[in-house]
Structure formats: C-alpha cells, structure tokens
Image (cartoon, rainbow, N blue to C red):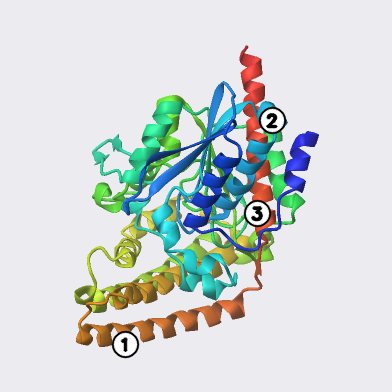
Amino acid sequence: MKEIFCDLLTNIPDYDVFLTADELDASSIDLARRFPETVKLFSIGQTRQGKDLLCLQIGEGERNALMFGCPHPNEPIGTMMLEYFSEELAKSRALRKELGYSWYIVKAWDRDGLTLNEPWLKGPFTLYNYSRNFFRPAGHRQVDWTFPVHYKDFEFKESIPETRAMMRLIDEIRPEFIYSLHNSGFGGVYWYITHPLKKSSYVKMRRAAERVNIPLHLGEPELPYLNELAQATYSNLSLKAEYDYLEKYGAENIGNLIRIGDCSASYAKERHNSFTLLTELPYFYDERIKDQSVTDRLRKDVVLDSMEYGAKSRAYIQSILRETRLLTGEENPFRVALEAFSGNGREESTKRMLAQNPDYNRPASLAECFDNLHLSKFYSSLSYGMAIRLCEYELDRENLAEEARQALEGIRLKAMEAHRALLDELEQELNYEAIPIRQLISIQLECGLVVCEELKERQGEQR
C-alpha cells in the first residue's frame, strides 16, 4: 500500500460516539469556512422535514466520485468515515492529487431518519440500547430504495424528495465511482459491487478487515438470489434481480410484494455506467459468524427454522399494530415501518427455492446456523424496539386524549416486557463484542481506496 494511504489509515481518530445530523452539518459548514479555496458546500435539495441536504465538493480531478452516508438512517458508520475523510481531503493537496477525483460528499443522506436514531448514537453500544432506540423507515420511504424503475409489469415512480435530490446530483456530475456507505447491525464484513474487480482487489478488501481483526460474514447472504463474485463479495442488490427471483419461484402479484423502487447503484450504473461499492460492516460481532465448521444439520432446515421464528415475530408485531391502529396516526413513522416489515408474502417462493436449489441440501456450516438461528432473533429485536417507540411517538403528543394515553401506555409496557425478554435471551445466546468505530472506519476507507486504485489503473490502460 502507498505510504500516503498508510498514513491516512494510521491517523484515524479514536472516535467513541457517532455525530448527530446537526453536528455533521455544523462540521461541514466549518470545514468550508476553514478551507474556502478547496471546499465548496451547497445544498442538493431538502428533506421531507424541510432540512437542507448538504453536499461537500472537494478536489480538482477530472473524474467525479460520489460518497454518501446514511442511505439507511440506522447506519452511521459511513458518516464518521466521511467526517474524517473530508477533513483529510481538504487539508492534503497530495492526497487529492493521488486519488485524482473531484469528490462530492453527502454525510447523511437520510438526515431526518438519522435524527430518530439519535438516542443510541452516543452509546452505550449494547444490543439493548441499539435495539431499544432503533429506527429504519419502510422500504417505500427509504432514500436509497425509491429510485424510479419500470421492469416487466412493475413500475415505481413515487420517489421521495431526498431520492430526487440525489438523482439530480448523479445526473449532473455523472460519477465514475460511487461509495454507498451502508452497514449491518450484527455479523461480519461483506461487500456489494456493480462491476467485477480483479482477484487481487478482492484479496486486498478482505485483508482490510483482517488487518483490524474483524471477521468476514460467512453466514447466509442477505437474499438467496445474490451472485457471489468472491468470498463475502456479491453483485449489487437490484429490484430487477428481486423480481426475477420471485418470478422464478412462482410468486403471484409480484408488484404488491415488492412495493419499493430501485437503488442508486442500479440507477447510476444504467445511466452513467458508474461503479458502486458497498462495504457492509457490523456494530457487533460474534466469532461464530466466520466459523466454517460443518454441522449435522442441513442448510435448508436451519433456514426453515429461521423462517418459522420470523413468522412468529411478525405475528407479534402485527398484534401490536392491531391494538394500536385506532390510537396512532397514519404518518407515525414507526407504524409505517412496522406495517411494511411485518408483511412478507415471500415464504412460498423461498420454500420452493429451498426444495429446488441443491446448495441448500448440504450440511450447514456453523456460521450459517449461527446466522439463521441467532442473528434472526437480533434483527427481530429491532422491530420489538420500534413497537415500543410507536407508542412513545404518540404519547409525546400534547393533545392526546387521556383514554388513548392510558391505552397506549399499557401497550407500551407490554411491548417493553417482550423486548426485554428477547434481549435477555440474546444476551444468554451471544458472546458478542461492540466494534470500535475507528476499526470500522479503517475497513470502509481502505476498501474505498482499493477500488479507487483499480479504477485509476483501468483508466490508464484505456489511454
């Protein structure tokens, strides 16, 4: 690795908390004030709550690169990487020259959603505090999943304001490289890319995780149709791939099942052939997520067990929604999210896939068992936490009738008991650690540098 990149990775601060949306904006404003000849700051549009979406422009390269944090608002690791990287870009002409891009940086794309995650951003970083204060919007309100798309008999064109703002920016700057800074909650490191890389680049990205002792995610992929290009590296998610998978395994009324748009990676690839990288990182990990030891259970059976648990979890959330339906507003963001997440409709397609795909008829690895039997409970705990917050969102209203207040308080207490019981179970089952923010930034930043270097080499070969 080049010395300038080694220094960049070595000097990452030891952050102990995440910044709020207001703190990120204030930092960007201050950066532009301190480096007026190098940094430009402008708004690409407004959020649904009327807040400016700020974008930093740094660098003088002929090629454009776009980086954004919080494509999902519960994923702030990227905001801290951008906080550090934007400062270093502004200070170092040598770094800007070496990378060769003009950088466009949006620290928090889902700014409104990030504010709803603020209660856990300053810690403590425990499973309880994270799940109790978690928020993630419904798919049709996610900034990175409401890009317009028309595929076969499906069409989506209800893009939200934040998505339309990013579309305009992408079409204006036509980025060669996009870094979409996602992260998972629990597990290990894995990647999505829109174009294949050289084998050596995959190795370098894995080494970025190994260098700071964070395991790869070697359990189940997020979705069964994903194409694995290298270990823990997949072709990017897309609505078209989702549609084709459901169609292949006999789903009906596919448009009603999907109900979202496409993502920035697909949009930018189709319009400008942009290369998009996603580096998925966990806040928490357990060593079992990388254990490839063979168990005595078939992979399809542990997936079916996970599906059964998921169905029970969704049934519980649906019961909360029924109890609160007449007590909550239709625009309660937690209600909207839980209504979307507690529906499924993909079970029969998944069961047919499990029966037909021979790769699921082999013994499961310990990592796959851990993913299906334990991490599924962790992700259910996030919905349990949002069920509590659904009630609290309404209880914060000043004009709430006393009868409704008492009913909601009773439901909230029951939801708190269910959440606490699930977290107690997880604490018994998991031997987890919270990963220092500095290590997560290091992986994300180094992987971005790896891709930048390969794209730079490709450009040189084309000349």
Q: Helix, strand, or loop for circle 2?
A: helix
Which residue is at a point 59% across and 58% down the rendered structure image?
A: 282
Which residue is at a point 38% across and 76% down the rendered structure image?
A: 388
Q: Amino acid at mark 3?
A: Leu
Which residue is at a point 46% across and 51% down the rendered structure image?
A: 223
From the image, state whether disc 2 or disc 1 is nearer to you: 2
Q: Amino acid at mark 1?
A: Gly
Q: Quadrant of the C terminus?
A: top right
Query: Which residue, given by chain and number where applicable, does mark 2 sit on?
Result: 93
In three-dimensional space, the C-alpha distance between marks 2 and 1, rounded to whole angstroms, equals: 59 Å
The mark that comes first in sequence, 2 or 3, is 2
Q: Helix, strand, or loop for circle 1?
A: helix
Report the front residue among 236 and 60.
60
Q: Amino acid at mark 2?
A: Arg
Report crowding for label 3: few under 14, some 14 to 19, many 20 or more residues within 10 A (C-alpha).
many
Which residue is at a point 20% across and 87% down the rendered structure image?
A: 403
Question: Residue 342, relative to residue 100: is it above or below?
Answer: below
- Where does the image place residue 26, in percent across and percent down from the top left? 52, 51
Query: Which residue, given by chain and number where applicable, does mark 1 sit on?
Result: 410
Q: Helix, strand, or loop for circle 3?
A: helix
From the image, state whether disc 2 or disc 3 is nearer to you: 2
**Residue 75 appears in view:** no
Q: Quadrant of the N terminus?
A: top right
Q: Is residue 115 left or right of residue 17?
A: left
In three-dimensional space, the C-alpha distance between marks 2 and 3, rounded to whole angstroms, equals: 25 Å
Query: Which residue, given by chain and number where applicable, does mark 3 sit on?
Result: 440
Report the front residue among 146 and 310.
146
- Where does the image place residue 374, in percent across and percent down from the top left? 55, 70
In three-dimensional space, the C-alpha distance between marks 1 and 3, rounded to whole angstroms, equals: 40 Å
